[in-house]
Image (spheres, rainbow, N blue to C red):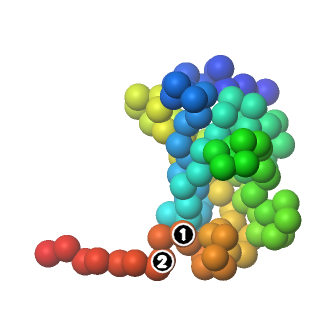
Amino acid sequence: MARAEDLGVRFDAAGLVPVIAQQWDSGEVLMLAWMDAAALDRTLATGEATYYSRSRQQQWIKGETSGHTQRVREVRVDCDGDTILLLVEQSGPACHNGTRSCFETSRTEIG
């Protein structure tokens, strides 16, 4: 089983790394969250997206209270090792405000 240390992830000074969750089959960008090494290890071990809440200072499993889960299909690390992309199978809304994506509320087209 893979562990955080095996992936070459570079955590910031607070021990965190940003994580982008993307719907695995459509490519829809769902949300941005944070992970610490323990949350990444749990994600890798269980296949359930587990994040770290900076405000509550604790781990949280996506959908644990809402039922809107993220089943992880693939974990990718960017070329610098300082960002993670989770390809997930989203069940229900991904955003805490009830929308499918956290990036639906404000759109500006350029050009």
Where residue 76 appears, as percent x and y from the top left, is 55, 40
SS at circle 1: loop
Classed neighbour count for the residue bearing mark 2: other residues with Cα under 10 Å, few (<14), some (14–19), many (≥20): few
Where residue 49 appears, as percent x and y from the top left, is 73, 50
Q: Amino acid at mark 2?
A: Glu
Disc marking residue 104: 2
Q: Which corner quadrant holds the N terminus? A: top right
Where residue 90 appears, as percent x and y from the top left, is 69, 66
Given residues 11 and 68, the one toward you in this image is: 11
Give the CA separation, mark 2 to mark 1: 6 Å
SS at circle 2: loop
Q: Which residue is mark 1?
A: 102
Residue 17, located in which quarter of the rendered image? Answer: top right
Q: Which corner quadrant holds the C terminus? A: bottom left
Labels 2 & 1 near each other (Cβ < 8 A): yes
Q: Amino acid at mark 1?
A: Cys
Given residues 14 and 73, the one toward you in this image is: 14
Residue 43 visible: no
Residue plotted at (64% across, 40% down): 35
Where residue 55 appears, as percent x and y from the top left, is 66, 49
Farthest-out residue, front: 55
Q: Give the left or right position of residue 85, taking residue 2 as reference.
A: left
Q: Give the left or right position of residue 99, taking residue 56 as reference.
A: left
